[in-house]
Amino acid sequence: MGCVCGRPSAIEDSSRPTPPPTQSTASQLVTAPVAPAKLVAAAAAAAEKKQATGPVRVSNGPDLERRRQGSFGSSQQHHHQRRQQQLPQLRALGSFPRAAEGEQVAAGWPAWLAAVAGDAIKGWVPRRADSFEKLDKIGQGTYSNVYRARDLDNGKIVALKKVRFDNLEPESVRFMAREIHILRRLDHPNVVKLEGLVTSRMSCSLYLVFEYMEHDLAGLASFPGLKFTEPQVKCYMQQLLRGLDHCHSRGVLHRDIKGSNLLIDNSGNLKIADFGLASFFDPSQGHPLTSRVVTLWYRPPELLLGATNYGVAVDLWSTGCILAEMYAGKPIMPGRTEVEQLHKIFKLCGSPSDDYWRKSKLPHATIFKPQQPYRRCVADTFKDFPPPALELMETLLAIDPVDRGTAASALKSEFFTTRPLACDPSSLPKYPPSKEFDAKVRDEEARRQGDAGGKVQRLTLRGELIENLKRSQHQMLMLS
């Protein structure tokens, strides 16, 4: 479901308001105390693997069946023992009372999840896996798969996000727990709603149940022949900024705003989704956060320069990229590496002023500071865009985060008050289901057909060459 850039850097996300947030699997954030726990878990796994290695015997008939059953039983017992061994590590990361944890296990939650995510799942009861029918796969990420499914209890179509914890690494569980905690804190028409969780006491996986949305913005943008109208762009932007304003007012940074994470239903409603990289934040505390977040094409310059003290401006930069992309019909800064991405940003938005370099004291400033300053050329590059759109872009894509304003201030910009106004979501055209995942499938199919067509063409040319050669040889024989 979109790329996640790199593995985590060892920087602690230490903004932890009350109640203390947990962390999500898809996130690239790693807290400093994690490394020893990971080493212990890896060592335990290696030791178990070594103990499990031994001579293999082949049997036939009933004896083989008995051995298979015994092997399955011992495997289940092995995983159960492993989970029990890891519980102390998991509990060390949580802050939930043991008595309450016991109640949650009794209610059907696995002990490894209750130990770390007690606050996140508090008051909920897990759904059973057999109460859903998987229909088809609609998304795939680094750490999860997403399916369209039917809730057999009420017939409703939902989205199931499956996250598997094969090794039950404490930090992986904690990452997912934070995502659940954040989703439960948010409640807004333009933020995707978490409707429940599916797991069991013996399970190593977890399904997040979401309302089903037919499209995402990246999928619609790549749909053949589709070009967004100006009222449509304003409609989507208005909903995105309203959703962000709600997140920021609840102390949540999304940190991965991009087209594939903006879901749209058949009624034109846009909802912000995938909070795997999201984090709680408190501007008054100033706790350091990791810079290893936000998909590369939408990552602001301060994060590329190693900033660990930042706020809502990171989401607003990504929003500016989305605005430009909807008008341009393609990503505006598609860098392949962090160095190239920063170069593209400086070429378009200008390099920071000397005053910015001095006051920011960013870790990578001395490495990436250009010898000659770049001139800002956003207005020249996108001169065909409507002036109010260009003005909002200039604000959202400001090099200095302080100049980007807030989601609330962006909603008050002239962009939304000049005609044509944002249309009502329900008036938007109805499209066939289209997600970034569908676009990738279409591209792969086109590539395969292209390869097959090329092969047929090569065979045809080869046949023609052979025929021509035979004809030439025949003519030479006739002449001789």
Image: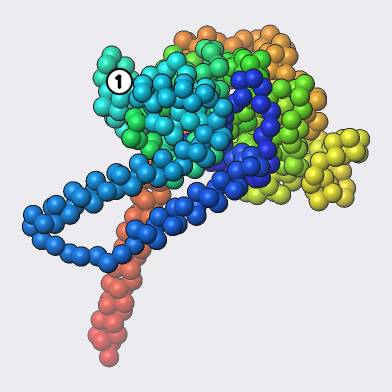
Work out whether residue 381 can be spotted: no
User: Which residue is pictured at 55% across the width and 17% down the height?
Assistant: 185
Would you call the spot at circle 1 few (<14 residues within 10 Å), some (14-19), or many (20 or more)? some
Name the spot of residue 189 as percent of width and height, x first: 52, 12
Q: Which residue is at the front of the view, 280 or 361?
A: 280
The local secondary structure at tag 1 comes to strand
Which image quarter is the C terminus in? bottom left
Quadrant of residue 348 within the rendered picture:
top right
Name the spot of residue 67 as percent of width and height, x first: 17, 54
Name the spot of residue 45 as percent of width and height, x first: 44, 53
User: Which residue is pictured at 24% across the width and 85% down the height?
Assistant: 478
Name the spot of residue 359 as percent of width and height, x first: 89, 35
Q: Which residue is at the front of the view, 307 or 43?
A: 43
Circle 1 residue: 151
Q: Is residue 473 above or below residue 323?
A: below
User: Which residue is pictured at 31% across the width and 16% down the height?
Assistant: 156
Quadrant of residue 21 within the rendered picture:
top right
Disc 1 residue type (three-letter) = Asp
User: Which residue is pictured at 17% across the width and 64% down the height?
Assistant: 58
Q: Which residue is at the front of the view, 42 or 232?
A: 42
In the image, taking residue 62 as reference, residue 57 lies left or right, namely right
